[in-house]
Image: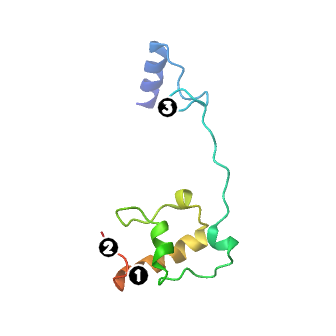
Amino acid sequence: MAREREEEYESRGGEGRSEGKGSRGKPRRARPPTACRFCTDRVGDVDYKSVDSLRKLMSIQAKLFSRKRSGVCSAHQHSLKMAVKRARYLALIPYC
């Protein structure tokens, strides 16, 4: 199926996606890697009682942002997940 799409692009005169172009024809810009905010502050575990810092890493629907979007390392993402679960259980942040 993917091959059919590539052939369709070529038949229409399109350039395809292999040339490093974005969806609007502009070149893609790679994001520089950011350091984990908890590692730079030398935080061991994320505190479930700091609701403001937890909400900064959550969407409007109270879903936790991914590691790529939040810029948190894997170890702190796990402790962040557990802190959010504890805060939800204690009704500090909503489940929705």
> Which residue type carries mark 3?
Ser
Q: Residues within 10 Å of mark 3 (few under 14, many from 20)?
A: few
The percent coordinates of residue 69 (x first, y second) are 53, 57
Marks 2/1: CA–CA distance: 10 Å
The percent coordinates of residue 17 (x first, y second) are 54, 29
Q: Which residue is mark 1?
A: 87
Q: Secondary structure at mark 2?
A: loop
Q: Secondary structure at mark 1?
A: helix
| Residue at 45% from the left image edge and 70% from the top image edge | 55
| Residue at 51% from the left image edge and 73% from the top image edge | 53
Query: Do the numbered discs 3 and 2 sit on residues whose CB atoms are within 8 Å?
Result: no
| Residue at 54% from the left image edge and 20% from the top image edge | 15
| Residue at 40% from the left image edge and 30% from the top image edge | 1
Marks 3/1: CA–CA distance: 39 Å
The first of marks 3 and 2 along the sequence is 3
Q: Residues within 10 Å of mark 1 (few under 14, many from 20)?
A: many
Pick the residue in front: 96 or 1: 96
Residue 23, labelled with which disc? 3
Residue 74 in which image quadrant = bottom right
User: Is 30 located above or below residue 8 in the figure?
Assistant: below
Marks 3/2: CA–CA distance: 35 Å
The percent coordinates of residue 13 (x first, y second) are 49, 13
Q: Quadrant of the C terminus?
A: bottom left
Q: Which residue is mark 2?
A: 95
> Which residue type carries mark 1?
Ala
User: Is 17 located above or below residue 55 in the figure?
Assistant: above
